[in-house]
Image (tube, rainbow, N blue to C red):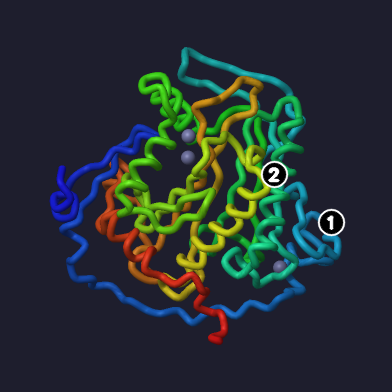
Amino acid sequence: MNDSLLKETPHRRFNPLICEWVLVSPHRATRPWQGQVERIAPEKLPSYDPNCYLCPGNSRAGGMRNPAYTSTFVFDNDFAALLPNVPECASDKDGLLVSQTEPGICRVMCFSPRHDLTIPRLSVEELSQVVDVWTQQYRDLISIPWARYIQIFENRGALMGASNPHPHCQIWANARLPNLPAREQMAQREYQRKHGFCLLCHYLELETQDGNRVVCMNEAFAALVPFWALWPFEVLLLSRRHLGSIADLNDAEKLQLADILRRITIRYDNLFQAPFPYSMGFHQAPTNGDPHPEWHFHAHYFPPLLRSATIQKFMVGYEMLATPQRDITPESAAVRLKQLDEVHYTSPAD
Ligand SMILES: [Zn+2]
Ligand SMILES: [Zn+2]
Ligand SMILES: [Zn+2]
């Protein structure tokens, strides 16, 4: 298919990481919008909130009190979805009623003592501390004998169901590979077996040659709107060197990760001049003792916003029952993200 067909004609695109299709309907992007487009007033958060259970020195719902922390702060979730000590037990009735117990640990990590400082407003130095703590947590959790997979993820904004605006992420460890990483592992392994090289290394090569979907880059990372993006402004963050997990980053690459996280999220906030909601998370090799040369360390940003700070994309109807669909092409989303400034819109002008 040539570029003009991709730009104007309904088509579908294949996501080789999870072996799924997405429908693209570029001809609809120009249809008039009947809904309301409003600019929301910037929310002014205090730097400390006496009622926030994540702020330093405050007490949490479980009765514990946070220390007067001064950089990052990690604790076991008081209402964890997974528990470390569960009896090993499984059942299978004719392959139809299948269940197994699942041990796990769920931690919460505050990025900063400041209630109001989100990732795009932290400095590269502060963010590189965050990256260091992610790495330490990863190492700490994989040393637990049953822990096989570590998921680091951030849910930002009330639209994504984040219950507290204090900037934080979660770190979950569990015994079995979760659904999405399991599918990506299968696809990466199969691609490697068939072609003899890494799926994402080769994909990155194609994207950097083409350049149309690359949003920003530094020496160690590239951020792009993937060819198969499903969410309007979805971003895939790829390490430029082939490595399996966050623990494989060298010191220079950790700094580069901090740099690119900041640049992506500043662009996101600048897009609609509002705090941009998303779910983001790293995907990395499991830690089951086997080598996983097929795994390429990366992160996904899945943001729900479509045309403004108040218009979101819903995955309903055909998308829920058949195939996800998008209107604006990944290429035009990339152009919009690429054109944005890397100075946060709330920064005072010089
Ligand atoms: Zn707080
Ligand atoms: Zn690779
Ligand atoms: Zn992934």
Q: Residue at the bottom extreme?
A: 350
Q: Which residue is mark 1?
A: 64
- Alpha carbons under labels 2 and 1: distance apart: 25 Å
Amino acid under disc 2:
Thr
Residue at image point 69% right, 60% down: 111
Q: Which residue is mark 2?
A: 135
Left/right placement of residue 298 relative to residue 1 reads right
Left/right placement of residue 294 relative to residue 82 reads left
Label 1: how many residues lie within 10 Å, few (<14), some (14-19) or many (20+)? few
Q: Quadrant of residue 166?
A: bottom right
The quarter in which the C terminus is drawn is: bottom right
Q: Which mark is residue 329?
A: none
Residue at image point 61% right, 56% down: 258
Query: Element at badge 1?
Result: loop
**Image spot of residue 170 (x, y percent):** 65, 49
**Image spot of residue 103 (x, y percent):** 69, 30
Q: Nearer the viewer, residue 116 or 86?
A: 116
Amino acid under disc 1:
Met
Mark 2 vs 1, N-terminal side: 1
Q: Is residue 54 above or below residue 256?
A: below
The quarter in which the N terminus is drawn is: top left
Q: Ligand 1 within 8 A of label 1's CB? A: no
Label 2: how many residues lie within 10 Å, few (<14), some (14-19) or many (20+)? some
Residue at image point 58% right, 52% down: 257
Q: Is residue 218 above or below residue 165?
A: above
**Image spot of residue 240 (x, y percent):** 49, 43
> In this orientation, does residue 322 appear?
no
- Count up the numbered dots: 2
Query: Element at badge 2?
Result: helix
Q: Ligand 3 within 8 A of label 2's CB? A: no
> In this orientation, does residue 110 appear?
yes
